[in-house]
Structures are given as structure tokens and as C-alpha cells.
Amino acid sequence: MASVSRDQNGTKRVCFTDGTGKRHVIRLGRITVRQAEEIRVRVEALLAARMYRRSPDVELLGWLNGLDDRVHRRFANKGLVPHRERTAGPTLEGLIERFLEASTVKPATLAAYKQTTDSLLEVLRPRTPVAEITAADADRWRKAISEKGDRRKPLASATIAKRVHVAKCIFSRARRWKLVPENPFEHLRAGPQSNPDRAFYVRPEVVQRIIDGCPCPQWKAIIALSRFAGLRCPSEIVELRWGDINWERSLMTVRSPKTAAHDGHAVRIVPMTPELRRILHALFDQAPEGSEAVVPRLTDPTTNLRTTFMKLIARAGYEPWPRLFHNMRASCATDWAEALPAHVVAKWLGHSPLVAAKHYLQTRDAHFEVAIRGGARVALGAAEQSLRTSA
């Protein structure tokens, strides 16, 4: 007979005795009581099959085949099942582990990769040999993530595009490592990773009202730096130091961890608007002597920016908009693009003009109003004049 025991730290284990009366323990980790009980029943079934020299039934064999190698090895080490034969090539699980170990991206990007890798392991199974994954399997995975989504909600097209892009990168690396003859995901179309439906222009007067209601000078600086200087939050704001601010010329030196690996994008110079300058100057006057960080509260990893910012927005009488900080940076980019050349805006924001057009620049209602009130007539008149001249 087998029984379930619970350790003091909450982990479960199955205890049983074999035919010689020797006691064995299989540690199960942190699982529910119901899951542990299901495993106990299967352990007893395996003990009975071994005692009477019978093969496990179809359902039990299917359950055993679904176990990953690490868990299956625990059962084999106790003599309940034979050890698995090693596959001729790496498994999907092994490829993903190797890909993540070889990646040199930031921790936040690695966390984003996990959404893709988890879905690959769920649909295609961890123990599947990489060499056996086909283009049909890639199509099946693409269909599964499109239909299932997360938390019973369909995934946005930009999210699906991102996951397809990551999956193609994983198997492109496998091909480079000569683990597969070709990339079975190569034919999948990723599509655009931008999502226009979540774009939102945050008006300056709205931001100013939110700032006026902030009880904390540091929070005023966080909001102003995001909206009026286009800094990425929190990665670029947390790196900002008082020595980076040129009060005489109203300029800031911004360091970007996200683009540090790209030539010419690790450091950039950004102008300070009068609104931002006033907020930073007030914060500087209150800063302790010898302090370096402009917004030291961001150095605390437990700081919940999103929740606090949503409360500040609601306190000002507004509804939170999608992608809170991204759309503030995008709104800053849109304002700059209306008055300055594209290459200048791109330089201040720390990316290329193409990236700005795809992910940041927005269409505002004011643009339609300008065209309706005469902007379109001016353009049409210029075109007609050009035709008359050429004739």
C-alpha cells in the first residue's frame, strides 16, 4: 500500500513498501492534495502490476509517457518502471534550455520569452525530439495559441506575432547549431508586433492635472520624465543621476539599458521642457546632500508603479488608459514629431525613425481638424499649381 505524506514546508511525497518490505519515498514537490492522491493511486497500480507480472493498462502507460524525464526518473529509480532510453537527439525541452542559456538579452526579455516557451512545451510536449518537429506541428502550435489565449481571453494579434517571432528565433538557432536540417517554423508569418488598438494620446493638460495631485515629488518626476521627455519607465528613469542634468542648457544625458547593446544607442541627450525643469528643480532642492539618483524610490524592486499610477489617475478624475507608461512616451514622441524632423525625434527617443513610426507616433483628432479646416485644400492647391506649371 502507498500513502501520501506532507512535509512541514508544504511539499508532498508518496511512501510505499516493495515486495521485500523495504520502504521507499518519492518526493512530489508543491502539488495539491488531489494531485498527490492521484499519483498515490497510480503507484499502487504499478506495484500491483509488478507483483503479478502484468503490464500496466493503457491509461497508466499514457500517464507515464506524459511525464517529463526528471519525474519519470524518480519512478524508475524506485523500480516501478524501466528507465527510459535516451533519444538520439535533443528534446524540445533541452533546446529551449540551451536557447535561454545562450541568450544575452535583459531579464525582462527573458521573462517575455517564457510565454512562448511555455506554449511550445504545452502544445508540442517537452520530450518530443527536436528533429521530429515538423512544419505541421508549427501550424498546430500557431493555431493553438490563436484559439486558446490567456485567461480565457483571445490573444492580441501583436502578442501572437511576438510569440511566432520568438519561436522562429529558437528554431533558427537550432538550425545554426545543426540540431535540425531546417527551421519548421520558418513559413509562419509573424505579422506586425504593434497594436494600434491600444494606442492612446495622453494630453498634456491631463498629465499636468495628475502631477498636481501627486503627494510625492518623486512621483511628479516619474510622470513628467515619461510624458515630457519620453524616457522609458522604469529602466531609463532609475538610471538618471543628478550629474546627468545640465541645468544651464536644459539638457539631460539618458542611459538606456534596453538599447545599450546597439551602437550609438546606449546614451542620448534629451531636452528638458519648462514644465519638466520646474519639477526636477523642486525635487533637487529637496534631495538629501550627497544623493545621486534623481528618483531613488525606483531602486526598490518591490515598488508597484502600475498600481500607484492608476490610483493617481483615478484621483485626478480620469480613466486609466492602455499601456500606461508606453503611451506617455508615445505621446511625447507624437508632440515632437509635429514640430521637429523625424531624425531628431528618433535621436531623442533612442530608436530609429522606422521604429518610431511603427510603435510610437499616433494619429490625433487634431490632425483631422487641421485637414478639414484647410490643410487638405492647401495641399490640393499646391498640386493643381504644379500640374498647371508642368502643362
Image (cartoon, rainbow, N blue to C red):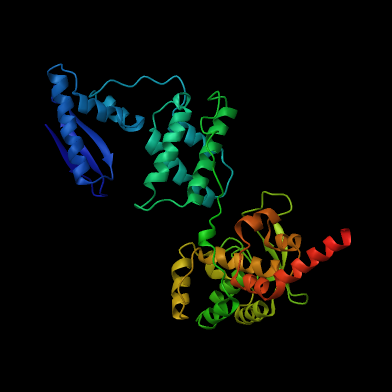
Residue 321 in view: yes
Q: Nearer the viewer, residue 343 or 248?
A: 343
User: Residue at position x 55%, y 50% from top?
Assistant: 193
Residue that extends furthest to the front in the rendered view of this protein: 391
- Left or right of 220 in this view: 132: left
Residue that extends furthest to the top in the rendered view of this protein: 53
Query: In the image, residue 131 lies at what x, y percent?
Result: 48, 24
Query: In the image, residue 112 lies at what x, y percent?
Result: 49, 49
Toward which corner of the image does residue 85 lie, by quadrant?
top left
Which quadrant holds the C terminus?
Answer: bottom right
User: Residue at position x 22%, y 39% from top?
Assistant: 13
Query: In the image, residue 135 lies at what x, y percent?
Result: 48, 29
Residue 293 in view: no
Which quadrant holds the N terminus?
Answer: top left
Query: In the image, residue 362 lies at what x, y percent?
Result: 61, 64
- Left or right of 38 in this view: 65: right
Toward which corner of the image does residue 122 lie, by quadrant?
top left
Q: Nearer the viewer, residue 375 or 80?
A: 375
User: Residue at position x 65%, y 53% from top?
Assistant: 259
- Left or right of 210 in this view: 19: left
User: Residue at position x 19%, y 22% from top?
Assistant: 56
Mark count: 0
Whether 173 is drawn above or below 198: the answer is above
Whether 25 is drawn above or below 195: the answer is above
- Left or right of 259 in this view: 93: left
Q: Nearer the viewer, residue 300 or 192?
A: 192
